[in-house]
Amino acid sequence: MHPELLSLLETAEQRYLEPKEIELYRRHAASLNRRLQAYEMLREQETKIFQAIADRLVNALPNESQENLERCLKYWLLIVRYSATAMLINDLSYLQNRLQEWVKGLLETYETYQIDVQVYDLLMQELKNYLSQDDVRLLDPVLQKAKDLIISKQPGNS
């Protein structure tokens, strides 16, 4: 749950919420339905999106090993799932906490900067093919945060 809402609920245990606080809660509740629709659409289209990315990735990076491509696709699938959850609960710190738990080890073990850049670019293109503009707009900030956490920390990225 979004930290600000959690704080509101904790406040509501001690006193009734003020009108401004109720309005904040109301806005969050109204946006939850839209975020839930985007989440469900991404869930339904995930296989098609990642199959298209996989097909295009092989053509874009023909000299890259199949093992590296598959590994990157697998962890980008997880990144997208974490991103979708962060978007749903409207909490970027959730994404950051989840990614930092395992990203550091992956980056130290595998040098996949070029693949990651390519997967991210293809992902953003494919999302536009399978999701509405509103859905992409909701996902964009969390995917940008994921990109910043993953790609900007890799060696060779200046």
Image (cartoon, helix red, strand yellow):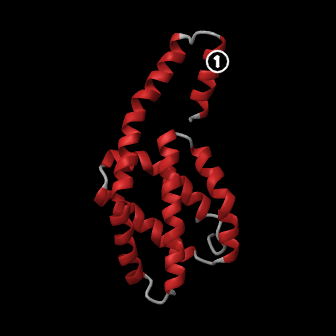
Determine the residue positioned at 34% across, 50% down.
41
Could you tell me which secondary element the residue under label 1 belongs to? Answer: helix
The extreme bottom residue here reads: 63
Q: Nearer the viewer, residue 124 or 88?
A: 88
Say which residue label 1 marks.
11
Q: Nearer the viewer, residue 130 or 137?
A: 130
Determine the residue positioned at 64% across, 16% down.
13
Q: Residue 65's spot in the image, x, y percent? A: 51, 87
Instruction: Choose top left, top right, bottom left or bottom right for residue 18.
Output: top right
Instruction: Choose top left, top right, bottom left or bottom right for residue 57.
Output: bottom left
Q: Which quadrant is home to the N terminus?
A: top right
Determine the residue positioned at 45% across, 22% down.
26
Q: What is the tally of numbered marks visible in this picture?
A: 1
Q: Residue 23's spot in the image, x, y percent? A: 47, 18
Image position of 155 with respect to 24: above or below: below
Q: Residue 92's spot in the image, x, y percent? A: 57, 45
**Left or right of residue 148: residue 30:** left
Q: Nearer the viewer, residue 71 or 20?
A: 71
Image position of 151 with respect to 2: above or below: below
Determine the residue positioned at 49% across, 55% down.
81
Q: Which quadrant is home to the C terminus?
A: bottom right
Q: Residues within 10 Å of mark 1 (few under 14, many from 20)?
A: some
**Left or right of residue 19: residue 4:** right
**Which amino acid lies under the numbered mark 1 shown in the image of this protein?**
Thr
